[in-house]
Amino acid sequence: MSMISCKRILALAACLMCLAGTALAVDPLPIDFSPGPVPDASRFTEDSYEDESISVHMERIWVDECQFHVAHVTIADASQLRTALAAPFGKNKTNRVSTIARDHNAIVATGGDYYGNEEGGYVVRMGETGRKKPLKSRDMLVIDGNGDFHILIHSDSEQLRALVESDIPIVNVFNFGPALVCGGELQAMPEKYQYNIKGREPRCAIGQTGPLSYVMVVADGRGAGDSKGCSVETLARVMADLGCLEAYNLDGGGSALMYFGGENYSTKSFKAERSVSDIIYFATAVESPAESGEE
């Protein structure tokens, strides 16, 4: 068993212990672009956040001369996996990952797929459809109302139709890729894909490890510390080793930044951030005592 696998088991066990036995059902957050509740600042440590609705455990690992920042997340309700935009659909505006995350009370966040930098793609955010132009040259990630991931190789039209017609709503759709892990199987990288997938670059990915359990990963590169960046193939191996059943490559490069607890958890400085159109984040489902007036 690899060192990553051992760490993953310990982190996931901690997440599950936090939420296990919490039979308390939390009220779902609205499926819209409203911010999550303000988290309880006293529950943050240097590398974790826990309350009755969410458990986040952070770690840093090195693989092949690249530093990976990993967030292990378990939530009580699918609505806590959220996306946010720099501006409403149709407005060509961008903002920093950290700024969008802070404005939406994110506990942990990364960039999304920078949909505003494209003219194609089937784009859905928080149940709202912004574009219906599937790209067969790309793999697609669909997140449904149960918080489950569905990866469509080459944006498979039959699979997409089945998901659209399903009783379970589609909440978010991303169009960057490629697929990293599908059905627990490490994916071979395509010979041709955009965005220099074979080069050493800063990278960003998200994966599902089980029901309402996820990992978010950012790989440093381009002079961030001593990290040399990684290929998408290496990123895929890391996501598989972290136990992902499904994993997907997101917008990296200048967009690759991990936000946690109001700070930059990755090595890139806030000043070096690229402004983007969208982020993925996790929110608490309970209001901070300071916000609710409780002691």
Image (tube, rainbow, N blue to C red):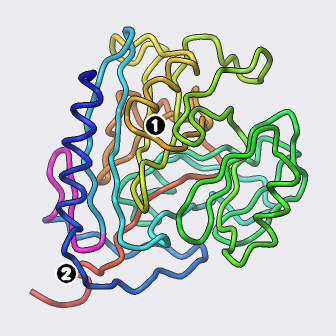
Residue 40 placement, left or right of 33: left
Magenta-drawn segment: 43-53
Q: Where residue 199 appears, x then y in whole percent?
A: 61, 10
Q: In which quarter of the image is residue 102?
A: bottom left
* Front residue (pair 183, 149): 183
- For numbered disc 2, what is the local secondary structure? helix
Residue 260 drawn above or below residue 293: above
* Mark 1 surroundings: few (<14), some (14-19) or many (≥20) residues within 10 A: many
* Front residue (pair 218, 191): 191
Q: Where residue 151 appears, x then y in whole percent?
A: 67, 46
Q: Residue at x 17, y 61 (%)?
A: 17
| Quadrant placement of the C terminus | bottom left
Give the residue type at disc 1.
Leu
Q: Where residue 144 appears, x then y in whole percent?
A: 62, 65
Q: Mark 1 points at which residue?
A: 257
Marker disc for residue 290 = 2
- For numbered disc 1, what is the local secondary structure? loop
| Quadrant placement of the N terminus | top left
Q: Which residue is drawn at 57% across and 29% down?
A: 254
Q: Where residue 123 appears, x then y in whole percent?
A: 77, 56
